[in-house]
Image: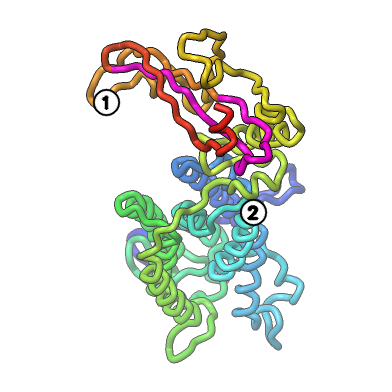
Amino acid sequence: MPLASIPSPSQGVWHLFGVVPLRAYALCIVLGVIVAVVIGERRWRARGGEPGTIVDLAVWAVPFGLVGGRLYHVITDWQLYFGPNAPNEPIEALYVWNGGLGIWGAVALGALGVWFGCRNRGLSLGAVADTIAPGIVIAQAIGRWGNYFNQELFGSPTDLPWGLEIDPDRPGTVPGVDTYHPTFLYESIWDLALGLALIWVGRRFALRHGRVFALYVAGYTVGRFWIEGLRVDTAHHILGLRLNQWTSIIVFIGAMIYFWYARNKTNDERVGMTPELALGSPGAEGSIDPAHPSDQADDAADTAGEAARDGEGPSRDGEPEAIAGTLGEGAGDAVDVEETADPAHPADQADTSGPAGEEPQDLPQSVVVTEPAREPGADDELHKVAAEKVVVPGKDGALHEDVTVDAVSEGEKERR
């Protein structure tokens, strides 16, 4: 008997009011999911994403992940449920609460669920994957404590002071041995350290396009490879290695290939609803450009276009709604001038600004005068005549007239 050891819990199930079972394994999984979503939400908002996005994506990821994790476990350990001397009944393959979730299947099918969610919301899968990677591995660190309560997936016998005590009647125990390597604890510590490292690396090197997620996969497989070698539970062996060790090798190579392949990606990643999807989905939020909401300037342009087609535009009948004067009447003829304002370019901002490094000056505002377009005559070759008389401030502070003629037909020149 070693001088020190880690005791195992006497039970992993409690009954609420003596009826409703509360299983430690399930509680650890749920707590891990909550922590992953909280971390993902904070990181997503820090990237400029819309709050609540990660929560919505979790609705897709969690069910897919549970199904995938259980499928991987049942497929790779089918002899536990369907073999001739199987210790469990076939129906128990559905008993998720008894333990048995393969992380490989959980991540693979969970990623498929996230892809569906990203596609519906117009988000970049790589951006989401990088955001949630640290939260996922920290959730794994929490979930591993469910194995502790179930006294399962422990390692080989050990006399180390942190050896884990396992009941002698548990599957995989060795007669006469009381303590084993706490592989659940090793993996929990590894996953927690990896999650913190991913957060630091992502900030330090500004990794994008799924490269943080690739590092998560690679880092997890490295730890899983050596921890898997310590376990003594039943598993398939290929060339002296356990099946999950071979899986770790293959997945590690794939993650490193992607990490190298994505190094030169420079295209933008969508963290909000694209303008095309926003226009096609009434009430959609999350425009990429926060300074140009899709329900403002675009709608104003559509309204102006419809007004021009209906005959309400300024040049429909040759009589604009606001006109300061016409060319040829002389500069001294004064008329009421309605100042033309550009809502996207307020006059009290850029117009009063001087050259870079100089204080703003209070200069007179320019007045744009537009001549009404005339109906084309027999000798007119153009359909529209547009001219502008611009009153601009000079260097001496006085106002000067500047006339710009965009297009004048031959017939118009004769009339003038």
Residue extending furthest toward the bottom? 239
When the figure is inspected, residue 233 is found, relative to residue 379, above or below; the finding is below
- Residue type at the position of mark 2: Arg
Q: Which residue is pictured at 71% across the width and 27% down the height? A: 317
- Tag 2 or tag 1, which sits nearer the N-term? 2
Stretch of the chain drawn in magenta: 371-394
**Quadrant into which the C terminus falls:** top right
What secondary structure predominates along the stretch shown in magenta? loop
Residue picked out by circle 1? 355
Amino acid at dot 1: Pro
Q: Position of residue 408 (x, y in %)?
A: 53, 36
Q: Nearer the viewer, residue 21 or 280?
A: 280
Pointer 1 and pointer 2: residues touching (CB < 8 Å)?
no
Residue furthest left in the image: 357
User: Which quadrant of the rendered structure holds the N terminus?
Assistant: bottom left
Residue 180 in sight in this render = no
State left or right for residue 322 relative to residue 180. right
- Residue 196 lies in the magenta-colored region: no
The quadrant holding residue 105 is bottom right
The label on residue 15 is none
Q: Which sits in the foreground, 268 or 382?
A: 382
Location of residue 350 in the rendering, given as x and y in whole percent from the top left corner: 39, 24
Q: Quadrant of residue 260?
A: bottom left
**Which numbered tag is attached to residue 23?**
2
Circle 2: element type: strand
x and y percentages locating residue 120 in the rendered image: 66, 54
